Amino acid sequence: MFDLAGKRALVTGSTQGIGRAVAAALAEAGARVIVHGSTSLEKCKRAAEQIPGNAEIALEDLSQEGCAGRLYGQTGDVDILVLNASVQVRRAWDEITPEEFDRQIRTNLKASLFLIQRYVPYMRKKGWGRIVTVGSVQQYKPHKDMAVYAASKCAQMSLVNNLAAQLAPEGITVNNLSPGVIATPRNEDALGDAAYAGKVLAGIPMGFAGSAQDCAGAALLLCSEEGRYITGTDLVVDGGMHL
Ligand SMILES: NC(=O)c1ccc[n+]([C@@H]2O[C@H](COP(=O)([O-])OP(=O)(O)OC[C@H]3O[C@@H](n4cnc5c(N)ncnc54)[C@H](OP(=O)(O)O)[C@@H]3O)[C@@H](O)[C@H]2O)c1
């Protein structure tokens, strides 16, 4: 089960958190993995060292114009594309700036489409491909101070549904994985605030925050041969928070 030997995988935003756990799971299953980040090559290298096998690295800010072509230029073709990187701005809907709107939409939606455009031709040629976007429980339960972030994830899900139907005849699956509250560097500060954490946890039927590892197995299924009959789905990993 879950043998990815001979497959090459790019996981965007894999220097830490969920992306790094997913990259490690794919590598453990035998894939050759590319670790990607936007901050520094040094950080990418440090993350790659924690991943089994000889992980490659790539650096690109996905909020920038032309990022898809530049990232593809660094990595070349892959069999598995996990679009995990995102920008999340926490600010009331009536205070969000045009720059914050654009940065979230460019990273969380625009880059997803243009990266898929770049990476699909090879998958098509092979008659096999796996694309997983990372969404959020906020597709179902938006946080009042993350209206644009939540909207970007809903729009990305719409792309997934659309492309899944179009790419299915070519052996390419397209799915979304929606984490709930997962303890990662992103929300370390928020969950470190006991009063806030208590309120958040009260909204999770299972009563606890997930770990990045909880998302890794779900992603592995969607990226594997075992997941070949799953496409256009949203795999929600949230302890029941969306219910
Ligand atoms: N954690 C949660 O509770 C939660 C809940 C729902 C959904 N999610 C989703 O899960 C995914 C991973 O979340 P996480 O909590 O693991 O995030 P995280 O700890 O903040 O890590 C984010 C990753 O994305 C990269 N990144 C950030 N901005 C980027 C940009 N402009 N261009 C390219 N890469 C960029 C970062 O790379 P560098 O640091 O190297 O720049 C890092 O590797 C995201 O899509 C997030 O929306 C998370």
Image (tube, rainbow, N blue to C red):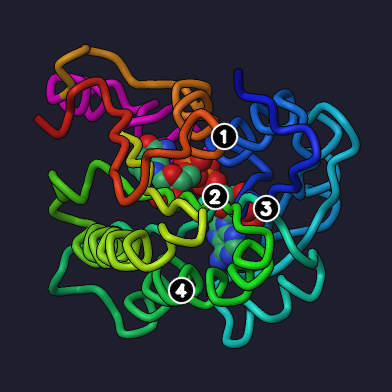
Residue that extends furthest to the right in the rendered view of this protein: 54
The residue positioned 51% from the left and 28% from the top of the image is: 226
* Overall secondary structure of the magenta section: helix
> Which residue does the numbered mark 2 point to in the structure image?
130
> Which residue does the numbered mark 1 point to in the structure image?
224
Q: Nearer the viewer, mark 2 or mark 4?
A: 2
Tell me which amino acid carries mark 3. Asp
Q: Are marks 1 and 2 in contact (CB under 8 Å)?
A: yes
Number of numbered discs overlaid on the protein picture: 4
**Circle 2 — which element?**
strand
**Circle 4 — which element?**
helix
Crowd band around label 3 with a 10 angstrom C-alpha radius: few (<14), some (14–19), many (20+): many
Crowd band around label 2 with a 10 angstrom C-alpha radius: few (<14), some (14–19), many (20+): many
Q: Which residues are magenta?
A: 181-203
Image coordinates for residue 29, horizontal then vertical, percent: 70, 25
Badge number at residue 113: 4
Q: Nearer the viewer, mark 1 or mark 4?
A: 1
Badge number at residue 2: none
The residue positioned 18% from the left and 23% from the top of the image is: 240
Give the mark nearest the N terminus, 3 or 2.
Answer: 3
